[in-house]
Amino acid sequence: MKTAARSLWARTLSEALRRFGPLAALLLMCAALSLLSEHFLALDNLLNVFRQSAVNALLSLGQLLVIITAGIDLSVGSILGLCCVLAALVLKAGAPWWLAILAALAAGAALGAINGLLFTKLRLPHPFIPTLGMMNVARGLALVITGGFPISELPGGFRYWGAGAVVRIPAPVLVVVCACVLLHLFLTRTTLGRDIYAIGGNRQAALLSGVPVDRRLIMVYAISGALAAAGAVVLAGRMNSGFPLAGVGAELDSIAAVIIGGASFFGGVGTVLGTLVGALIMGVLRNGLNLMNVSAYWQTVVIGAVIVAAVWVDVVRQRAMRR
Amino acid sequence: MTPLLRLEHISKAFSGVPALDDVTFEVLPGEVHALVGENGAGKSTLMNIASGVLPADSGRTCWEGQPVTLRSPRQAQELGISFVHQELALVPQLSAGENVFLGRHPCRRAGFDWVRWEEIHQRAGDLLEELGHRMDSRRTVAELSVGEQQLVEIARALAFRARLVIMDEATAPLSERETARLFEVIGKLKQRGVGVIYITHRLKEIYQGPDRVTVLRDGRCVATAPVAEMPLETLVRHMVGRPAREQFPAPESQVQPMAALRVEGLSVRGKIQDISFQVNRGEILGLAGLAGAGRTELLETLFGATAHGPGRVFINGRPVNIRTPADAVSHGLALVPDDRKAKGLIPEASVRWNMVLASERQPRIHAAREREKTDRMVRELRLRTSGPDQPVAQLSGGNQQKVVLARWLLADAKIFLMDEPTRGIDVGAKAEIYEIIRRLAARGAAIVLVSSELEEILRLADRVLVMHRGRIAGELARADASEESIMRLATGGDGR
């Protein structure tokens, strides 16, 4: 019976590690950095970390939905770039800031929905293919439209969403918090959200239980596109320009945040909180390395190692659980 | 005669729970030894110990009279023990021949190891022919039927000079004809002096080849005897530990004179041709045929999972257009798929979630109602689970199938399309599933029952349709249906 007790203990520990492992890692990192640098815990610096993580967090939330369905969305960085440009164009045409935001979100959702339609209706073998296509098409369009030049000097009402603040809390952070709360409720409290987990857990079984799998997948990619557009609004506001090369490589950062946050690449597993923590871990890491004067080149090396380490910890955990 | 393999006084526990308790088991050269028992009786654990996958806690393993310690499957393989798994372990993209020699390609050394393809296909072809089946070993495994794939696995065992072959539920995916061929192959193995351990749920097969049978129950060996001295009733009694309950209670369904589902001229190119039939409320319609006759395709087409060509479908007399499984569900259809793991369940999700998947389709989740529904189903179907939050993957096959059935009961389905509902399920749970099917019919549900076990169809069905090569080969009234008449139609003959 001693072994039974031990295995129960191991399982509980493993479950706790899955749920709170990323959070614990984040807190540990913060503790270490506050010892290494007196600037780290300063309120201004922390707010800065949050602000800088906001765009990646938004992309990661969309990526999370896709990865829960056992898919992947390579186009979020390019959709962000194109939506930056579109929002700037709408503003330059004299439209009010809110119309520009709506236009960007609608465009992002539409581009995402196209990803979903290509995947489900053309029966392409894996979402890698349509989103890889969209990644190139959207980036190309952004460059075609602008001729490669940024569209600068945007009106203040729009810039507020990237650079403004409510009582020192940066507006982008509020956007992320709202997105997180909504998405969390969506995933945990609605049957739509649960369908997404079911599709990732076993697509065939979900289909044969009457889940409208294709419609759900199209919705998931549309949401991912819309969240990329939300990222575009925040980024364009912060940079005060619609920059066609915005978000190059951002899709990989978003995938990294989702995976660090404990989602499974094989689908069916993943949480909003975990993903948010994953995005913050990447932000804190970059910030901390900056404070310690580590070059940006080396930061990339470190982040790569962290991604592999995070997944490895999960593999070890699962192996321990099976024992 | 010295036994090939002898396991003496083997005990094994998992997390303190005994799985095997002082079991002794042996196989002689050229002997086919059947191993039976309900799910959880310890068959798999014993075979995992025999093939080096698991170590025993206590006891002794002897190979040809010499004590050995099997530390890995590889070591067991080198001694000559081969395991033909229920889930085949072949690489579908590679040729049959290459699969036979996978990992041990015959090579010519000249700087590199150059693969000798001629030799591979020559030897693989010879082995397959020796097993009584001529085929081109250059075909890829994906093109082969399940039965042929199994032959490739057995050929691989022989290529590795196996002296003992363990077959776990080898006939589960096979049609009756393929099963008969497998028994011929087993006969060939016997002639070569190879020992065979044969695990099966189909008790009838015990009397078609095996020499001896051992029954496990709750981790103990309750009987070992020559097959001739172990009639079916005794065997079942040993397995369940109580007098054999009537396994198939006689049907008393009340067929109502109203068609619940009617199909006219339904076709799917290359799969099914011009299918017409109807099933009434309260009726159990058996759908028999060989593997590949199109039965699964027919059910999945009716359920909207596959697009169909010409043909019309009526539910309660009204024409319907079912294009997706979601449409089918809204028309009161239910599909119990042939492959629980791949098509029926979300394995990591809880019992509760799997149960309410089809019925709780409104946008907001009603936790209290879901709990109430799940508790009711657990009671009603006597589901053995540690609780509604247990991942469904941890349940036994029979209980998993009950979860799938519960899903459709909760969805208030009226027409059940059941594809091999008792495949891989032990005797006790089978009887319970039969009871559920009968109860459904008694309540006025219409049931289409696909099964490869003729006995199951004969005992349950009010009427039998037989399919052959995508067409309906004939219809048999309950009184005319027999194993012979069904098999004649299923193999392309006439029904008389």
Image: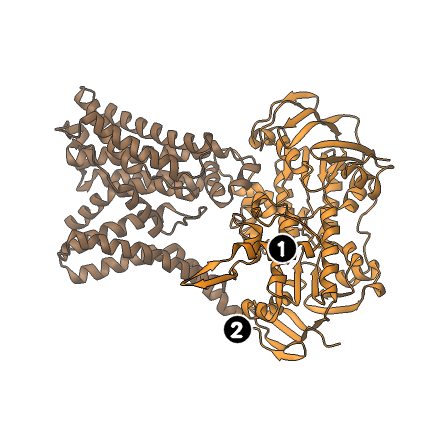
Chain colours: A brown, B orange
Q: Is residue A142 left or right of residue B358?
A: left
Q: Quadrant of residue B2?
A: bottom right
Spatial separation of the CA atoms under disc 2 and disc 1: 34 Å
Q: Is residue B165 left or right of residue B456?
A: left
Q: Let me know if residue A195 appears in the view.
A: yes
User: In the rendered structure, which amino acid carries the disc numbered 2?
Assistant: Lys
Q: Residue at the location (49% across, 45% down)?
A: A201
Q: Quadrant of residue B448?
A: top right
Q: Chain of mark 1?
A: B
Please name the residue that numbered disc 1 is placed on: B86
Q: Let me know if residue A41 appears in the view.
A: no
The local secondary structure at tag 1 comes to: loop
State whether residue A266 is above or below residue A210.
below
Q: Is residue A117 left or right of residue A32?
A: right
The local secondary structure at tag 2 comes to: helix
Q: Residue at the location (53% across, 43% down)?
A: B368
Percent across and percent down for residue A291 are: 14, 55
Is A14 or B320 nearer to us in this picture?
A: B320
Q: Quadrant of residue A23?
A: bottom left
User: In the rendered structure, which amino acid carries the disc numbered 1?
Assistant: Gln
Q: Chain of mark 2?
A: A
Percent across and percent down for residue A83 are: 26, 30
The residue furthest front is B110
Q: Which mark is residue A2?
A: 2
Percent across and percent down for residue B244 are: 81, 57
Image quadrant occupied by the N terminus of chain B: bottom right
> Total number of numbered labels?
2
